Amino acid sequence: MLQPQAGILPAPLRGGRYLYYRLRYGAEAAGALRSLTTEPWGAQDVLGLAATLVTRRGGEVEGLRSFPDLSDSQTAVPWTPHDLWVWVRADDIGAAMNLGRRLTEKLKAAFELVGASSAHLHGHDQDLSSYHDGTENPEPDEAPGVALIQSGPLQGGSFVAVQRWEHHLEHLEAKSQQEQDLVIGRRLVDDSEIEDPGAAAHIKRTEQESFEPEAHLLRRSLPFVEGFAYGLEFVCFASSLDAFEVQLRRMVGCEDGILDAIFSFSSAINGGYYFCPPVKEGPLDLSFLGAKFTEKGA
């Protein structure tokens, strides 16, 4: 029976490591990926395959695509073409780094590690701005219906959208507390929603129930600090990429020309879409890529 990867639904652990891989020129992915189907996949890790990798290997995942071209937006929203994304979850950054090193060693014959970052829980599910992140997440019993494909050969799989947001908190802190609250659309003191914060407030740009159909997501983001840079490693899971994409298009003004007020102190500096395949009796199930990507096809 197909099941979701174990790291998708639970709340994040304290530490996280995000690894980005590119298929080496001329390399064959089958052997490296097949190694992930011969033993149980990590109890807390999440792996995603980009559309580029799936299509080049002759596979097909309905609904998987590359990050959108938002050239008609009010601000730049870049994306980075990677083939494989892994979120290594652990109780501390050191453990996450060591788990990531072992995975990279297993994949190195075919995949080159081209990007890595670390993140860690802050406060009580707070962004570094101190505002709560993921307030509108579904309740635990509703999360599978939001995050997972519910039927068909890919049942238990999930789509994930990943972005890094780099903050410049001095721009936010230059505002009064009331003005800061209006940027987010919630009061910092108690996380309560402001009744009419204005059309540019972040909660108005991303209000899930205001889309048709409703655009529900399971957010699993973590703050990062790296040298002089800091911000949010945004991660959200859904049964379709459409929910994230309509929210992003509204945020950057494609819908009505209004730019999300969050851009007054934060910038998206990369992004990507991936498909997180289900697991079958422990190992990842990559049968959608063809027989040569399964242990049986070795």
Image (tube, rainbow, N blue to C red):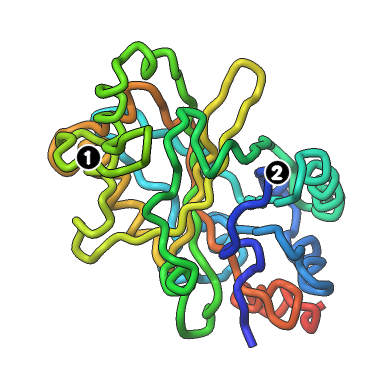
Query: CA gap, disc 1 to disc 2?
Result: 32 Å
Q: Residues within 10 Å of mark 2 (few under 14, many from 20)?
A: many
Q: Is residue 201 visible?
A: yes
Q: Which mark is residue 224?
A: none
Please name which of the two marks, 1 or 2, marks the residue nearer to the observer.
1
Front position in the image: 169 or 73: 169
Toward which corner of the image does residue 121 lie, by quadrant?
A: top right
Q: Position of residue 217 (x, y in %)?
A: 40, 59
Q: Position of residue 139 (x, y in %)?
A: 44, 66
Q: Position of residue 289 (x, y in %)?
A: 62, 73
Front position in the image: 118 or 70: 118
Q: Residues within 10 Å of mark 1 (few under 14, many from 20)?
A: some
Front position in the image: 155 or 210: 210
Instruction: Say which residue label 2 marks.
Output: 15
Residue 255 shown left or right of residue 101 in the figure: left
Q: Is residue 143 above or below residue 120?
A: below
Residue appearing at x 71%, y 46% in the figure: 25
Instruction: Say which residue label 1 marks.
Output: 194
Which amino acid, mark 1? Answer: Ile
Residue appearing at x 26%, y 24% in the figure: 178
Mark positioned earlier in the residue sequence (1 or 2): 2
Residue 172 shown left or right of residue 3 in the figure: left
Which amino acid, mark 2? Answer: Gly
